[in-house]
Image (spheres, rainbow, N blue to C red):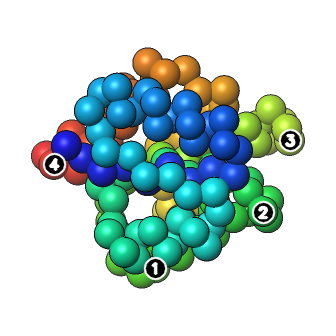
Amino acid sequence: MAKILVVDDDPDITEACTLFLEREGFEVVSANSRSSGMASIEGAPPDLVILDVMMEQPDDGMAMAQDLRRNGFTNPILMLTSISKVSGLEYGRDNDVVPVDEFQEKPVDPATLIEKVKRLLAAKEG
């Protein structure tokens, strides 16, 4: 089954995502910061990354996504965000600024998360 990396500084989010995804049979690894997420990817690249926008720095998730793409990571990235609730701004996919495949608003609905993960992994395979 696919390996998924969840990168979020909120342990409730990483634990919930891990629970939902493992129940579906996925192998899940988590990291609580941009640096630990990057280290995890260097060791064994996951099939998909679930990445929070704001961690230690307000743009850690965006910077990590940019670093990953610059370093040749082509697997799907699903970005978790509560930024529109916090800032009132809408974020969309942008290949340069936010090079991710999909956004998911927090709080995360388990069924929606699973559906998006499965769709992104199927598109990667197809």
Identify the residue under disc 2. Answer: 56
Q: Earlier in the sequence, mark 4 or mark 2?
A: 2
Query: What type is the residue that disc 2 sits on?
Result: Glu
Q: Earlier in the sequence, mark 1 or mark 4?
A: 1
Along the horizontal axis of the image, is 86 left or right of 55? right
Describe the element under mark 4 as helix, strand or loop. helix
**Residue 85, located in which quarter of the rendered image?**
top right
**Cα gap from disc 1 to disc 4, whole angstroms:** 22 Å
Comparing marks 3 and 4, which lies closer to the viewer? 4
Describe the element under mark 3 as helix, strand or loop. helix
Q: Residue 86, percent across and down?
A: 85, 38
User: Residue furthest toward the bottom?
Assistant: 71
Structural crowding at the residue carrying mark 1, measured as other residues with C-alpha within 10 Å and reported as few (<14), some (14–19) or many (≥20): few
Query: What type is the residue that disc 4 sits on?
Result: Glu
Q: Earlier in the sequence, mark 1 or mark 3?
A: 1
Structural crowding at the residue carrying mark 2, measured as other residues with C-alpha within 10 Å and reported as few (<14), some (14–19) or many (≥20): few
**Cα gap from disc 2 to disc 1, whole angstroms:** 21 Å
Along the horizontal axis of the image, is 111 left or right of 10? left
Q: Which residue is at the front of the view, 53 or 87?
A: 53
Identify the residue under disc 1. Answer: 70
**Residue at 56% from the left image edge and 37% from the top image edge:** 15
User: Residue furthest toward the left?
Assistant: 126
Identify the residue under disc 3. Answer: 87
